[in-house]
Amino acid sequence: VYDNQGDYEKALKSHEKSLEIYLISLPPNHPHIATTYNNIGLVYDNQGDYEKALKSHEKCLEIKLISLPPNHPDIATTYNNIGAVYGNQGDYEQALESYEKSLEIQLISLPPNHPSIAT
């Protein structure tokens, strides 16, 4: 909610508190931890802090690659988010590479008419 309201400072504090709790109570490669890194990355991206956004999304991806099957749709989503950050930075070559990885996974893991493939 804070992120959608543009209150990025509160959004980051909430996500960082969530991450702190998860890191204490869950195994280090738990998907909830990956999701929290993803959420932090989304806030940084919305702020225009692309370096921090990429670091958060890459940490999310690292965990998902360990904890999920290699063609899981959530991995595709993370590659898509990384591509969006690169696109926002104007690094279209890297964006395209990430989007292509996302699409490759989606074509394997989703039905052919799934809306995520169109996106």
Image: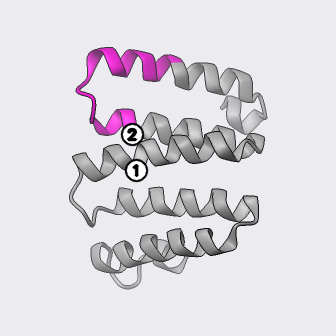
Cβ–Cβ below 8 Å for labels 2 and 1? yes
- Helix, strand or loop at mark 2: helix
Taking the spot 67% from the left edge, 39% from the top edge, the residue there is 44
Asked if residue 25 is positioned above or below residue 108 in the image, the reply reads above
Element assignment for label 1 = helix
Residue 23 coordinates in the image, percent (x, y): 35, 20
Q: Amino acid at mark 2?
A: Ala
The residue where tag 2 is placed is 34
| Label 1 Cα crowd, 10 Å radius (few <14 / some 14-19 / many 20+) | many
17 relative position to 30: left or right: right
Mark 2 neighbour class, 10 Å CA radius: few under 14, some 14 to 19, many 20 or more? many
Query: Quadrant of residue 12 in the image?
Result: top right
Circle nearer the viewer, 2 or 1: 1
Q: Is residue 92 left or right of residue 7?
A: left
Q: Residue at x 27, y 35 (%)?
A: 30
**Which labelled disc corresponds to residue 61?**
1
Decide: is 61 above or below 75.
Answer: above
Q: Position of residue 7 (x, y in %)?
A: 76, 28
Q: In the rendered structure, which amino acid carries the disc numbered 1?
A: Leu
Label the magenta part by its dominant secondary structure.
Answer: helix
Image quadrant occupied by the N terminus: top right
On whether residue 85 falls in the magenta region, the answer is no
Name the residue: 65% across, 61% down. Answer: 86
Q: Position of residue 49 (x, y in %)?
A: 73, 41
